[in-house]
Amino acid sequence: MRKSKLVVLVVSIVASVLFYGLPAKGQTQPVIYFYLTPSVSVESMEKSGNFIKDFLEKETGMTIKLGVPPSYDELVDKFGQKEPCFSIMSSQSYVLAHEKFGAQVKLRSLRYGQSVYYGQIICRAGSGIKTIKDLQGKSIAYTDELSTSGYLYPKQILDKNNIKPAKVVFAKKHDEVVRMVYEGKVDAGAAFYSPPGPDGEMHDARARIKDKYPDVEKKVITLVKTEAIPNDPIVFSKAFDPEAARKLYVALVKLTTEQKGKEILRELYGSEGFVKASDADYNSLRQVMGVVK
């Protein structure tokens, strides 16, 4: 009798180990939502995003659904829903999602070997705009009010210099800001900046429209750069299962070791890898957010 009970106990323990984390019979595996920050056309983002989604599903066995919210605001609000989600999002969006919904940062992007990047204010060459003071009474395009490099840090520069543009527009995407400046629709614009590579190759927002406008580097110039900004974080919703999150960020790191994965991440966000991150990495950003209104 004792022997039979012991056998049952051992079998139960083995079964619990083998099937730990699997859905119970009759239950379906929960869908995990993967959101991308809108930065280029929705079509381009969905194509690249689906490649990442498929890779992550294959690596983790999870069921993942891709989403590209139309605005930074709506992306942040996704973290207040009950469904588990994760996102590659702007630094400022993360700070808000953390404060409002307890979102957690696990990784941040590497851009060309750096874990920080910059914002820039751009203008047309030959426009007569040579310093920040020349933007007084001019028109400027930002991306989105929750964009760190495309709004927050550039606006801080204008505020410090008491510059009040006559017209402000929000173009939503970095490439659209550059295009508007190139075509003369606005006098200046704000977008992300990373220094050129060793070979002189352009790595900032202007590179995104170079195929269509080959002379963009000459026609659109950097007027000023911002302070360093912590790179875009990989963020998980508050109640996200820790082990599931670990599997996903391990898979994301693996994605960066494959050529196609590197190309996709570079196209989306200029990213080439990930490093571990903590909430404290974004304290300097919080200070700026407390000043800029």
Image (cartoon, grey):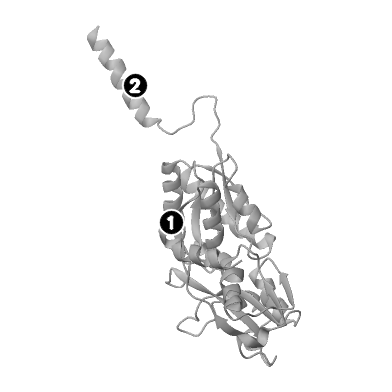
Q: Is residue 15 visible?
A: yes
Task: Say whether disc 2 or disc 1 marks the residue closer to the N-terminus.
Answer: 2
Q: Position of residue 290 (x, y in %)?
A: 53, 64
Q: Amino acid at mark 2?
A: Ser
* Quarter of the rendering containing residue 11: top left
Q: Amino acid at mark 1?
A: Asp
- Where the N terminus falls, by quadrant? top left
Whether residue 95 is situated above or below residue 172 in the rendered picture: above
Nearer to the camera, 274 or 102: 102
Q: How many other residues sit within 10 Å of disc 1, few (<14), some (14-19) or many (≥20)?
A: some
Q: Position of residue 61 (x, y in %)?
A: 49, 42
Q: Is residue 277 visible?
A: no
Nearer to the camera, 111 or 16: 111
* Quarter of the rendering containing residue 47: bottom right
Q: Which residue is mark 1?
A: 279
Which residue is outermost to the left? 2
Q: Which residue is mark 2?
A: 12
Nearer to the camera, 118 or 251: 118
- Where the C terminus falls, by quadrant? bottom right
* Quarter of the rendering containing residue 178: bottom right
Nearer to the camera, 228 or 292: 292
- Mark 2: which secondary structure? helix
